[in-house]
Structure formats: C-alpha cells, structure tokens
Image (tube, rainbow, N blue to C red):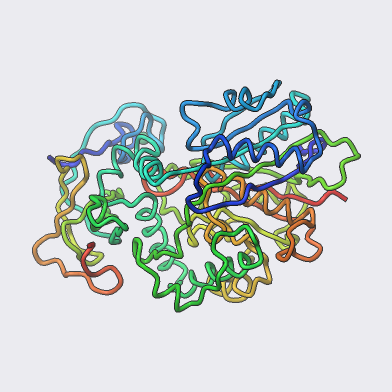
Amino acid sequence: MSVAVQICRSCRTQFFPPRLRCACCQACAFDEALVRTAVIEDITTIRTRRPDDASRGYLALVVTERNLRLLARLDRCCSPGAQVRLQVAADGAIAAFAEGGADPCGGDDGGSPA
Amino acid sequence: MDFDGAVIASAIEVPYRRKPSGVTTMSLLADAFAALLNDSGLPAERIDGLAVSSFTLKPDHAIDIAWRLGLRLRWVMEDTNGGASGINMLQHALRAVQCGDATNVAILAADHLSEAALLHLNDNYNAVVRDHLAPLPFGGPNGLFSFVTQAQMRRERLEPVDYARVCIAQREWAALNPNAVYRTPLSVKDYLNAQPVAPPLGRYDCVPVVSGADGLLVSREDGRRGRGVRVRALHALHNYDQQMGDGLETGLLLVADDLWRQAGLAPDDMDIACVYDDYPVMVLAQLRDLGLMGGMSMKSFVAERLSTRSLPVNTSGGQLSAGQAGAAGGLHGLVEAVTQLRGAAGARQVADARRAVVSGYGMMEYRYCLCANAVVLERAP
Ligand SMILES: [Zn+2]
C-alpha cells in the first residue's frame, strides 16, 4: 500500500501525519496524495537492551520531492542521499526500501541493529 | 503584567532513586507534599490551591490527590505537558495567587514508572506516537533526537566530543549533589565508548529513569517570609513552527526578547541556567535560543563557558545525571534554581546566586517536541 499524505486544497502544502486544519493557511479541505519515493536525509540504528525487541532496527528520516519529512523503517542500512521506495507495511509502519544501487552505510551508523 | 504579589516560597525534591521498592506515584506525591509543608512551615489547612503533573496518575486526577491529601481547595489544576509542565503550572499558579483565587498553591509532580509502564508510555504518548511512531523501530524519543542531534552537528559543526562536554560538565555538578543518581566522574573516553542507543546518541546522552517527586509552593507575598524567590518574567510559546522545521530551534527563540524585556535583565545577568535536558542537543538549543551564548558559536560556548562551568548550567547534574522522574523532570530545574537562589544547595551552591533562568521543553509529536517556556527568577531582597 502506498503512503498517503494530505495536501491542502487551498495552498497545496503537504502534511503527514494528518491535520484538522492547514498549518499554513488554516483551510480545512485536503486532498490525498500518494508518495512512492523519497531520499534518505539521516539514518540511525535503534538498539534496545531486549534482544527480542521488535523496536530494534534501522530508522530513517526521509524527504519527499515536495520537501515533506517522514520517518520510515529502513530495510537495510544505507547512506544519506540514497533513494528509497516507500510503502505502508501490514503493521502500519512506513517502510523504506533502498533502491538497488544504494551504497551500504559505513561509519557510526553501520552494522547490524542486533 | 508583572508577577508582583506572588512569590515562590518553597521548593523541595523527594530524592530520586533507581528502581526503588515499596514506592508508588501516590506515595511520592504525599512525600512531596509533606516536604513542602515542612520546608515552608505552613499547616496543610492553609494550602488552598493544588497543581499536579504526573504520567502515572490514571485513573486519578489532581482532585483525587487533593482528596487523598485531605485538602479543601479553592483552585485546582492538572498539567499534562511533560517537560514544560513545571513552568506551565507555575505560570497559572502565579496568576491565581496574584488575582486572589488562591493564597498558597502547592505544585507537585511525581512519577514511579515500572519498566512496563515506561514502555507503554513511550509507545502511547499521544495518538501520533501510537499510530505513526510506535510501529517503527523507534526506541521512544531516542530515534527522534538522534535526527535532531545529527542536524545540529551539521549546522553547528559539532562533534561527539562537544556533546561529551555537556554531559561531563553536568556530571561534575552531580558529583556535588548527594541526591543525583549518577555521581561518578565521566570522561570523554567513557562517553565516546558508551553503549550506542540510537547513534550518534549513546548511553550518556539519555536520561536515567528514576522514581521521585518535586514540589514548589507559590504564596501570596506577605512581607514576612524570608527565603522567597520572585518571578521577574515568564513566557511560553508552544507549537511555534507547526512541526514544519528541523527541531533545532524551540519556541524560546521567538519569546526570548520579550522574556528579557519583561525581566528588565539580560542573559549576562544570570548567575545560573537550568534548561530542560532530555538530551544534550536540547540543552544547547535552549541555551542558544535564550540568548545565553551571546555572539559565541555553539562550539566555542561549550568549550569556554559550559565545559568550564563558568556559566553554571543544570547545577543539580540535570536529568542526565540526577535522573528523570517522569513528569517531575518538568519541575526539576525550577526546584534546583530556587534552591540555589535560597542559598540551600550545599556543596554545589553557586556563590552569591541572585538570578536564574529556567526553561522547559517537552511533548514529542512526530519529529520533536511542541512545548517551550522559560522563567527568570530572582532572590527576594
Ligand atoms: Zn493551506
């Protein structure tokens, strides 16, 4: 399932998560847009003390072509600047999948989330 | 409008402890109330206002606490704004006392969070967290503040060692505070080698969860009580950027000029600063937004003013070393500043401390926190 974001019908600003009124122009009517790709701005590896914890993994801050920032679960570690495909996973999370040629990350954020 | 006629007459902290047994949020609130009465010398019958903040009150509310404490109230409020709750309650209590709605307001905050309660709170902080963040690899606010930290490092050209200096300076203060839960010296090497939590954040960038309580008494100024602290200015700005920025600023940036104008003072007049330290990145953001860095770069400020402790910041050790007792963290900095201004801070007492600025920050939404407020305090002559 694609990621749906709000677009203000009046000023076309995009929002996610959804608002009740536009934060820019206070309009109340929104359209929906589907966002399928984005670029990774930053990445981190969430580590917790519990080895079975489902909250471990790669978390990415991604930016869409309309400059909207979303948080997404990343399927594998890759570097900022990499292009990702976005989907809503069965558990409701935004999932990001690195495009084929994305560089694997190194440095501080590298390694397994385990 | 100034705050004449109301004074902070008392400030107490129920010592923070890691995983204590035989303690509940209710027992901590009761201990805080008893400590306020003891410190102020007021009998319970004279308390006619109550403000409470806690993440673990449910299903009770402030009025249920009043009933358990046997209080008859003319004024009551409950605050849910986490790291901004302390100054928010103070803001309301000052006006209530000034306007005559109450004469003596007890402001209490406490939490005893079990591991399960903390995990539940982290995943259900609000609807956005529950619906859009909890399904992610999220780790509570750690993931969000990893990104804010990375953005600040880029913009301010900071390195991990700069954040180490923030944590080390606070640990040096904590060593002088018998109630801080972490008091052993921290080195740059310790910091850099710490267990990663959400890189670049490691263990020492995250607050240790403790159980504890804090309390303030706001009273009508009667000219007799000796150790009171006056409020020179208080300003707040919440949701200032609609979560459309990068989280590197807080609402304090837009109200700082009004704050100093109302106080009739300047950042350089402050003897102490207590800023809400959920993460080192936000310590630096608030100090900058309040104008305390003057014309210095953030990096120079850390090296020359904060690391040297020539500007006393978070003199209790802050939450990073003293601990975070849930919503009591929203009062912790206020209690520390008032304690310093009353000359009651023991080994960590800042010599001749007369003025302090305290800021609050809290309530994470999708990417960073929404609430910010600040108060300028002065020792009564
Ligand atoms: Zn609009």
Q: Ligand 1 shows up in which quadrant of the image? A: top left
Q: Is residue B126 above or below residue B318?
A: above
The outermost residue toward the right is: B224
The outermost residue toward the left is: A100
Q: Quadrant of residue A113?
A: bottom left
Query: Where does the N terminus of chain B fall, quadrant-wise?
Result: top right
Q: Position of residue B82 (x, y in %)?
A: 51, 42
Asked whether the viewer can see residue B95, the reply is: yes
Left/right placement of residue B283 relative to residue B216 reads left
Q: Quadrant of residue B205?
A: bottom left
Q: Is residue B132 above or below residue A65?
A: above
User: Residue sitting at 80 percent across and 34 percent down?
Assistant: B42
User: Residue sitting at 59 percent across and 23 percent down?
Assistant: B63
Q: Position of residue B101 (x, y in %)?
A: 74, 23
User: Residue sitting at 75 percent across and 26 percent down?
Assistant: B102
Q: Looking at this view, is B174 or B15 the one in front?
A: B15
The outermost residue toward the bottom is: B189
Q: Quadrant of residue B231?
A: top right
User: Residue sitting at 78 percent across and 47 percent down?
Assistant: B229
Q: Looking at this view, is B109 or A73 the one in front?
A: B109
Q: Position of residue B84 (x, y in %)?
A: 56, 43
Q: Looking at this view, is A11 or B168 the one in front?
A: B168
Left/right placement of residue B190 relative to residue B344 reads left
Left/right placement of residue B222 relative to residue B324 reads right
Left/right placement of residue A30 relative to residue A103 reads right
Q: What count of labels does the image hold? A: 0
Asked whether the viewer can see residue A43, the reply is: no
Q: Position of residue B296 (x, y in %)?
A: 60, 71
